[in-house]
Amino acid sequence: MRVLIVAESFLPIVNGVVNSVLRVLEHLRTTGDDALVIAPAGVKGQDSVHEYEGFPVVHVPALSLPVVDSLPVGVPSRKVLTVMRDYQPDVVHLASPFVLGAAGTVAARKLGIPTVAVYQTDVPGFAASYKLGPLTSVAWSMVRAIHNRAALTLAPSSATIAELEERGVERIRHWGRGVDAERFNPGHRNEELRRSWLGEHSVDSVDPASGTAGRRIVGYIGRLASEKHVERLRSLVGNPGIQLVVVGDGPERGKLEKLLPEAVFTGELRGAALSEAYASLDIFVHTGEFETFCQSLQEALASGVPSVAPNAGGPVDLIDHGVTGELLEVDRFESELPAAIGRLTSDDHIDFRERAREGVLPRTWPGLCDALLGHYRDAVGEPRHERKDAASVPAS
């Protein structure tokens, strides 16, 4: 099968949309299918990636918007249609479609190619977070128009499916996200890293895995942006039993460093450093309610870290309340967070850690990507014949 992926964002940006696309490309390589990616070019000195897993990545011009300047937005252009016509895909995968994805939708309809739209970003919710309330209804109109032109819409959580249905989106199926249980594993816990975070308090702290109490490390891992509401961690400031750690970067970092003066800010981490950071936490807190899935939460759970998140969106499917963590109502999240941390760091902390990992182990990327190929086939109806004469498209 020939799959053309129109991605609203791509490397060197790292976020949930990009990570999912990378896992899909890796799977397509193992299954012997073919793929091509259309994505925004890098901005502000970012080096664009021209191929991944041997599949070409074709770039369209990108702009940085003042409100979210760390996420370049692809500019729709005729290039999308030209590349799609030359590549002759069997199916078009729209990854979190909005601006560039809308262009992909138009091009695919013009060429008669079925599309599978993967809903991954709560754009209307982001508009509200950035105090762009009047644009919320416009955003929903765009979401509805794009997704109702697709053969299928794939949504990652029950809460997201319910909201999309309420907003008039049709033909929705559930498609979740996998987790690499080897990369995100309690075995990556690093006591030296924990001591560096605890600083002068490290002599009074012991490994919670031993069952004895000590100063707990509570962390957030993710983008530091308005819609993530990391400022809600301020209810933990001044708590002598807690060391806050914030992993990630983004436009809100300066503001958050002032708001959370006792927290350790590590900046963005990748690879082994990220795995160690997750596993070295005692409690993971995801603070924002605008998550269609919340991959960082799933990675924390796989790392054996009990977690707290808002009772909204993707986390509702990931946290078994009182078993692997706690779900707090959005309007009371900040005020109830300290008590939730206290409950999760009680004498049952070891049990919470074990149950956290057990709950996500069945969620593997190979299984989910196989399911995605099934959705592709359903969208196509009958697999098209291989077109070996299809023009190759050079990366640009």
Image (cartoon, rainbow, N blue to C red):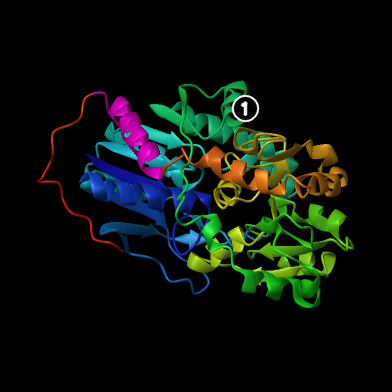
Residue bounds of the magenta highlight? 365-381
Q: Is residue 214 magenta?
A: no
The residue lying at 71 percent from left, 48 percent from top is 349
The residue that appears at 76% across and 57% down in the rendered structure is: 212
Q: Nearer the viewer, residue 242 or 156?
A: 242
Q: Which image quarter holds the C terminus? A: bottom left
Across and down, in percent, residue 388 comes to 10, 45
**Can residue 67 be seen at all in this image of the molecule?**
no
Residue placed furthest toward the left: 389
On the image, numbered disc 1 is attached to which residue? 163
Above or below, 229 against 175 in this view is below
Q: Is 234 displayed left or right of 380 in the figure?
A: right
Which percent across, then down, holds residue 97?
48, 42
Say how many tags the image has.
1
Pick the front one: 161 or 94: 161
What kind of element bears circle 1? helix
- Quarter in which the N terminus is drawn: top left
Residue 355, located in which quarter of the rendered image?
Answer: top right
Provide residue 151's location: percent of width, then percent of height.
Answer: 38, 26
Q: Of all residues shown, which one is farthest toward the bottom?
A: 200
Determine whether 102 is above or below 60 in the image.
above
Kindly identify the amino acid type of the residue bearing the numbered disc 1: Glu
Main secondary structure found in the magenta portion: helix
Q: Quadrant of residue 61?
A: bottom left
Neighbourhood count class around disc 1 (C-alpha, 10 Å): few under 14, some 14–19, many 20 upward: few
State the residue at coordinates (57%, 62%): 64
Whether residue 339 is situated above or below residue 392 in the rendered picture: above
User: Residue at horizontal 52%, vertical 59%?
Assistant: 187
Q: Nearer the viewer, residue 329 or 318?
A: 318
